[in-house]
Structures are given as structure tokens and as C-alpha cells.
Image (cartoon, rainbow, N blue to C red):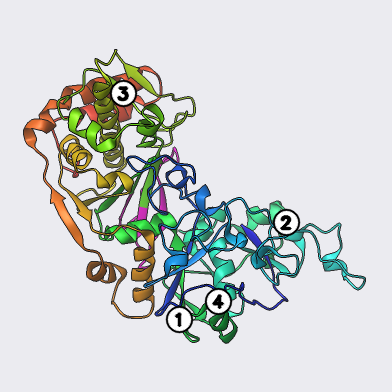
Amino acid sequence: MWLLREHESARPTPRPDAPPTHGAVASLGHGADAGPAHRADASPGHGADAGPGHGADAGPAHGADASLAHGADVGPAHRADASPGHGADAGPAHRADASPGHGADVGPAHRADAPLAHRADAGPAHGADAGPAHRADVPPAQRADVRLAHQADVITARLTGHPTPTDSSHALKTAYDLEADSWPHAVFAELGLPEPLLPPVVRPGSRLGEVCAAAAERTGIPAGTPVIAGMTDGCAAQIASGALREGSWNAVLGTTLVLKGVSSVPVRDGTGVVYNHRAPDGSWWPGGASSVGAGALTARFPDASPAAMDRAASAHEPASVLAYPLTSPGERFPFLAPDATPFVLGSPGSDTDLWAALLQGVALTERLCLDYLHHLGAPLDGPLTFTGGAARSPYWNQLRADILGRPARVPEQTEPALGMAALAAYGTGAAPSLADAADRMVRIRGVLEPRPARTALFADPYARWVAELERRGWLPAPVAAHARARLNLDTAGS
């Protein structure tokens, strides 16, 4: 979150080396819900080097407060798979470790004289003639000339030359009520936050303005290019998967596992494990983020060759042990258990046996996620799409389809920048709906069919694994019972 000074001009950050881009620009806020899958220090392997947007919450490699505007043909300096700092030639203003306002090489976006992008902890303006609104004893959030802004809002303000509304996807992260389509004014008033602090909110895909002349000169983006309200990186990745029609789901497997789907109504979850984004067309995108994933593989086998280990793992179906491959303590989905820890039941016969158990453990968790969504009444009868760094493993893709007992699609390109390009196309009227725009732009590389004999092999391991989670007090009994009742069914809502 940032605080913006309303009365100052929204001059864009100088980027003399920025490549020209053409077409509409949709904003994407990295870090709004980003996570370990994008850590700058992630080791290579299954998903460890997944690009931004392929994690529940895209991550520190882009900085907790970094932002980036993506267009349909964004250049190398802003590539979705760029290394920390958004490209080899990116200035210090976008470095993941940059400290705003400190150091001789601090980029223009964080300079003391920057006209916009004042951080929440930025000090008051200095000067002999500073009025009461700028006094040192007035908290920034309570100054009359300041308003809340998300990372993407800072970029769109610089592109258009004026403050812009925020999109409801980012606003969800700062307590915007998507069902009431309103800020929780009473709650904010109790916190002492003034009404002018809150920006107007629009749906993703709404037109925010055009690239101004000053921004065009500094970025190379043609003046007059439409600027479209974007979404958080997890939603951008979902758009890039093409999972946009009711009942369809996107499973993003990188360092951790994320599932996002589409429903005509919000999916209610009293535990808060599953929450909903609001789509541009008014439908709902329920989802959740688990702490299992490929990070468990790289932590246990940092020097292993994933492809070689995958080939050897095929001889261990099922493995001789059961594994719950959390990447860190605590679970968020398909159940809430802050005290959950990874475990292996039994003694593996070899490293490849353990590798196989970890692969299978992730897939078993994925199955439980879908069973939990079915328990909540979420529609699951649409196509399932695999994305994320782990989707580069043909063996793991097929194993997951077998354990889930349902077909799975694998797209050619899954970077979130593609999702923002589709959103920009929809926002400028190039397609009648966002789903239509994605249908034209997302290409499916292949569809994996489950092998019934292999699915049957994992029924007993799944039942024992669910029982162990329940025994440890992490998985609620009604959810465990629901999963057991669906042992002989697929996970497509049957």
C-alpha cells in the first residue's frame, strides 16, 4: 500500500532505457497476493523459478511494494519472467532490496523530490511555509491531501498524469467489500481514517485514461494509448490460463499450490480458507492457496535433476511412504492449521521413493482441495488447467491427472502478462467478454487424460493420508468424511 499526495502532478518515473510498447496497457500489481513461488533466491527445479503470478501471492523477487504495467507486447525490461528488478537494465527504483529515500543510487520513483508514490511511512513535507496538513505531528494517513493507493495505482497515475481510481481486485486487499461494492466506511472511521483517504473503485477492465505526453516521452509508450484497470497477479495468471467460464479451475503449482475457479455466486466459507475475487463481468473467482508444493522437493533435494528423478519415480506408484510436503509450517488450504508441519509416514526405501512420495503428496493435497471445494458447493464441472513452474514436468502433470481422476489442460504460455493483455483487449472493446478475449489468445498445448487403473492405485493411499490429517487434528471431521465419500469418484463435481 502507498499513500499519494493528491495536489502534486503525476509525472512518470524517468526510464530512458524503457522499450517502446504498443496497444492498451493494463496494470498488474506484483506482490498484492504474491508468494514464495517468486522468491529471488528460489532454487531451480519444479516450479522454483516460476514466473510472476504463478503463486498464491507473487513475491519478494518483485518487492513487496513493486509495481509494473504490462501490455500485450511489453519489452524485455518489463518481461514477466524478468529477474529481480524487472530486467537486467532496470534502475534501482525497482530493485527488490531498494530502500526508499536512501542511498546515492536510489531510482527516481523513490527520490526525496518524487512527486508521487509517497510511501505510507514517508515523512511530512518540509518547508517553512508548510501548512497544518503537512505538520510533522500529523500522520500521513490523516492528511487531507493524501489518499490510499496500491502499487498498480502508482503506475497508472504516472502513465495518465493524474490520480486514477483503483480496481476492485487490488482494493480487496485493503478491505474493500466486493459484495456491497463499497469501502467499509464505518470500520475505517473507527480506525480514525478520513473519508478522503479512500480512492474511487472500478471493475477491472475499466478505462482509466490515456498515456499522457510526459509519460510517452519518458517510456516510449505512444501518447493516447488507453490505460486499463488491471488485477492482482494471481488473477492475471488465471486469465492467462483461460479458466474463465463457470465451473472451470486453474491449478497453479510452483513453490506452493494455488487453485482459482469461476462461480456465478460467491463460494461461502466460514473458516476463511476460500475467498472470492470479483471478475470484470460480475461473476466470482473463488480460490485458496496451500503451503504444499515444489518447494518441498528443492528443500529436500537441492542438487537433484528433476527430470532424472521423475523418470525414476515412475517405478514407485504408489510410493512406500505417505508424505505431506509443506514448504513451511502452517497450512492455509484446504484447511486452516497454523500448527501443521510436514511429515513422512514410514521409512522410504530410497531417495527416488521419497521423491515419488513428495510428488504424490502434492497431488493428494490437490485432490483434497477439490474435494473441499465440492464440500462448499463450488461448481467443478468445467475444465481444469495446470499452470506454474511445475507444469513443465510431463510426468508430474500426468500423475496429478491420474490422482485427481479428471482431465487437465496445459497451455502453451501461462505468464500473467498474457492475462493482462487479454484484459486490456476486453477493456478496449476488442472482445465482447473477457472469456472471449482469452479464448482468442490462450493456446492449449495438450490435454492429459487420467488413467483409471492408476487412479484406482491411489484410492487407498488417499484414504490413509486423509485419516492421518484428521487424526492430527488439522482436517475437520466433516471434510474428511466428505473426501472419503468421494473416493471412487472423480473430482469434476460428480
Q: Residue at x 83, y 59 (%)?
A: 138
- Crowding at mark 1 (Cα within 10 Å: few <14, some 14-19, many 20+): many
Q: Main secondary structure of the magenta part?
A: loop
Q: Residue at x 60, y 68 (%)?
A: 199
* Residue matched to label 2: 103
Q: Position of residue 4 (x, y in %)?
A: 67, 67
| Amino acid identity at mark 4 | Leu
Cα distance between the residues tagged 2 and 3? 47 Å
Q: Which mark is residue 226?
A: 1
Q: Position of residue 150 (x, y in %)?
A: 57, 61
Depth order, front residue of 271/261: 261
| Amino acid identity at mark 3 | Ala
- Crowding at mark 3 (Cα within 10 Å: few <14, some 14-19, many 20+): many
Cα distance between the residues tagged 4 and 3? 49 Å
| Amino acid identity at mark 1 | Pro
Residue 101 visible somewhere in the drawing = yes
Counting residues from the start of the chain, the first of labels 2 and 3 encountered is 2
| Amino acid identity at mark 2 | Gly
Q: Position of residue 274 (x, y in %)?
A: 40, 44
Residue 182 visible somewhere in the drawing = no
Counting residues from the start of the chain, the first of labels 1 and 4 encountered is 4
Cα distance between the residues tagged 4 and 2? 26 Å
Part of the protein shown in magenta = 260-285
* Residue matched to label 3: 323
Cα distance between the residues tagged 3 and 1? 50 Å
Q: Could you say whether the residue bearing mark 3 is in a helix, strand or loop? A: strand
Counting residues from the start of the chain, the first of labels 4 and 3 encountered is 4
Q: Residue at x 44, y 37 (%)?
A: 271
Q: Could you say whether the residue bearing mark 2 is in a helix, strand or loop? A: loop
The answer to whether the residues at label 2 and label 3 have Cβ atoms under 8 Å apart is: no
- Crowding at mark 4 (Cα within 10 Å: few <14, some 14-19, many 20+): many
